[in-house]
Image (cartoon, rainbow, N blue to C red):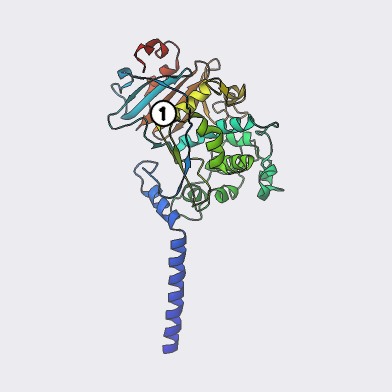
Amino acid sequence: MQRMLVTVAVIALVLASLAVGALAAHWPFWHRAWQWQSAADPWPAELAGPTAVLQASAAPLPLHWVSDARLAPRAGDDPQQLIIVGDAQGWVAYWSAPSVDIHSPVDGRGLATALLAPLFGALQQHMSRPVLDEPVRMRIDEWRGDARGEITPRQLLWEMSGLAAGTFAPMNPFNLRAQLASGPDFNRAALHTPLAWPPGSHFEPSPANAQLLSLLAGTLEGGGYAHALQRHLWSRIAEHDARGLMDHRRGNMAAHCCIRAAPVDWLRLGLLLAADGMIGTERLLPEGYVAQMTLASPVHPAYGLGYQLTGSREMPVLRMATSGRRLDVSPRTRRAVLWMGKGVPPLWLDELLLPGIFGPADNGRGG
């Protein structure tokens, strides 16, 4: 009897040690998973863990600022934090709540995916062969001979990869959406995402699409996603450093969320597209690339290359919308509008993209 008790005690001790070891090894996942689970909004206020620094430009696009009370909330508007509107010439008007600093980093949430289409344009600018229509099996060894290997970056940007979106169960370590949100390996979770539809046949947004695009951008550059993003995009347009969430130290950066950057630099991203990929007199994106972004996908008339499409055929608008954040770009009027707040963006934001509403005509007050 005593020998049996000792044996049971030893087994229990071993199991407890294994459980503690597993918990400790996956502590970053559990920490973030609980933040997702307990968040009051759809997005946590901040996620714990290591980050990658995206270094700013030594000579960002200069902006000429006007503080404009006409952008303040109107009767019936949901609470908001800031509105910034600018044009491709660098004239910018803004309104922000007293507690908001437009130069201090905030989590862009789903705005992170707005970086991917411009990044592929910037990469294309330096490559002799087209990269958007190259099957991913050319870059992802794990998918050679796999049906998923026929997916192209263009289909990923169109959200037409056919990869399953799945459901988000934050506290389930075996849930692929949870692994994409909390780790421990963002790229591995994306690579394990199964096909639900044949590639190119069905529109279904999935965070795995963004993560796979980041993996491909990293292989095209040769130094990983964070390096490619910083070298080819962020260090060319931004005034301030940004930080992107990593799955683990020396690991992969999240692509579908969780980049903390100053609102003025999120606007600069929009102004890059409003200026047809130009930074001053330098071309950062190939000529005609932004026009490609405004073309609807084959199966979804309201979705273009990495962005939603609104507006009209004559004046298309590129939109990236997520909880509490929205970036709108009009290549035709060469304007961009950034809104950050709570609730629903005000309907009158669309007016700010129209010519003659305000902007350079008000530049006598610029600084």
Given the current orientation, which residue lies at the most extreme front position? 58
Q: Classify residue 124 as left or right of residue 358.
A: right
Q: Residue furthest right?
A: 145
- Report which quarter residue 278 is drawn in: top right
Which sits in the foreground, 318 or 58?
Answer: 58
Structural crowding at the residue carrying mark 1, measured as other residues with C-alpha within 10 Å and reported as few (<14), some (14–19) or many (≥20): many
Q: Is residue 1 visible?
A: no
Whether residue 270 is visible, yes or no, is yes
In the rendered image, residue 134, in percent from the top left (x then y), is placed at 69, 36
Quarter of the image with the C terminus is: top left
The one nearer the camera, 13 or 56, is: 56
| Side of 77 relative to 280 (left or right) | left
| Quadrant (top left, top right, bottom left, bottom right) of the N terminus | bottom left
Tell me where residue 175 appears, x and y as whole percent. Answer: 50, 52
Q: To which quarter of the image does residue 222 belong?
A: top right
Report the amino acid beneath label 1: Val
